[in-house]
Image (cartoon, grey):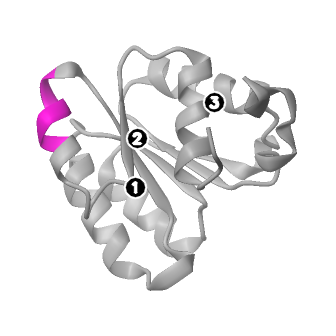
Amino acid sequence: MEWLSDISWIKDKKILTVDDNEVNLMFNKICLTRAGIVKENICIAQNGLEAVEEATRQLFDVIIMDIHMPVMNGIDAAKKIKEQYIGSDRPKIIANTGDYNIDIIAQDKKTFDDYMTKPTSPEEFIKKIYTVLNFPA
């Protein structure tokens, strides 16, 4: 796990984590801070609409998106966010979902750059971010 020994690649990345479950948000935030991301670079949204609004206000390197949420689901939110960006400014979006959505998410390469299933380990969580940012895993 060489990618975990040198955290310089992640410390300045701006991450938006989106989930309607407080425990999941806390897990995500703990994983990100332990990996070395500056707390000011971690933003939280509790539904898809909030995620779209945050992505309109500021640029993110990575968005970790739950799928089933109130107000706006993660699939619709990810599509709206991707529509807002052109080229290299577009954030990488990782779907964070239960096992029952894997087939749908895995086939949807236009909306999501990758996916992970809940529950996931802190190491796998950070590794997904590492790989979507095009570092060799």
Which residue is at the front of the view, 55 or 8? 8
Q: Which mark is residue 50?
A: 1
Q: Position of residue 1 (x, y in %)?
A: 72, 23
Gap between marks 3 and 1 measured at Cα: 17 Å
Query: Which quadrant: the C terminus?
Result: top right
Residue at the image position 62 percent from the left and 31 percent from the top: 126
Q: Is residue 31 magenta?
A: no
Q: Secondary structure at mark 3?
A: helix
Residue at the image position 63 percent from the left and 45 percent from the top: 136
In the picture provided, is 67 more to the left or to the right than 122? Answer: left
Which residue is at the front of the view, 96 or 72? 96
Marks 2 and 3 in Cβ contact (< 8 Å): no
Identified by mark 2, the residue type is Gln
Circle 2 residue: 46
Q: Secondary structure at mark 2?
A: loop
Instruction: Answer yes or no: is residue 72 visible.
Output: no
Q: Position of residue 91 (x, y in %)?
A: 51, 64
Which numbered disc, 3 or 1, marks the residue closer to the eye?
3
Identified by mark 1, the residue type is Glu
Instruction: Answer yes or no: is residue 131 visible.
Output: yes
Majority secondary structure of the magenta segment?
A: helix
Q: Position of residue 69 (x, y in %)?
A: 24, 38
Q: Earlier in the sequence, mark 3 or mark 1?
A: 3
Q: Position of residue 45 (x, y in %)?
A: 46, 46
Magenta stretch bounds: 100-105
Circle 3 residue: 29
Identified by mark 3, the residue type is Lys
